[in-house]
Every structure is written in C-alpha cells, then in structure tokens.
Amino acid sequence: NADLTNANLEGAILEGANLKGAKLSNTNLRGANLQRAYLRQVNLRDTHLEGAKLDGANLLGAIR
C-alpha cells in the first residue's frame, strides 16, 4: 500500500490508477484526474480534492 501522506499531487493524471489501501491523508490532489481510479479503502483524511475529477472512481470503504 502506497504511503502518499503529505504528497503534492496537484493536477496529477491518475486516471484508472489502482491506489487500493493507499494513505492519502493531507495529500494535495487539487485538480487531479482520478476518473475511474480504484480508491477502495484509502485514507482521505484532510485530503484536498477541490476540482478533482472523480467520475467513475471506486471509493468503497474510503475513510474521510
């Protein structure tokens, strides 16, 4: 499981990425493309998602 805590991924293209179980707490994902990304069981506490594209993303069990 990837630990991306505090990472700056603003504007990143993560379309279709498999981030299952990743630690994304306090990560900057503003404007990121997360369409169809696999985000099951990720930690999204204090994650910045303003303007992020989440169409079709799988967020089942995500911690917010």
Image: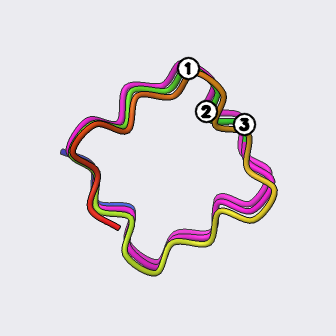
Secondary structure at numbered mark 3: loop
Residue, disc 3: 33
* Residue 7 percent coordinates (x, y): 52, 69
Q: Residue at x 28, y 36 (%)?
A: 60
Residue 43: name its quadrant. bottom left
Give whichever of 34, 6 is nearer the camera. Answer: 34
The span picked out in magenta is 5-32
Residue, disc 1: 36
* Residue 50 percent coordinates (x, y): 75, 65
Mark 1 Cα-neighbour bin, 10 Å: few <14, some 14–19, many ≥20 = some
Q: Earlier in the sequence, mark 1 or mark 2?
A: 2
Mark 2 Cα-neighbour bin, 10 Å: few <14, some 14–19, many ≥20 = some
- The circle drawn on residue 14 is 2
Determine contact: label 1, label 2, CB under 8 Å. Answer: no
Q: Which quadrant: the N terminus?
A: top left
Determine contact: label 3, label 2, CB under 8 Å. Answer: yes
Q: In the displayed structure, does residue 23 sit left or right of residue 1?
A: right
Q: Whole-Å distance between the Cαs marked 3 and 2? A: 6 Å
Q: In the displayed structure, does residue 53 sit left or right of residue 16?
A: right
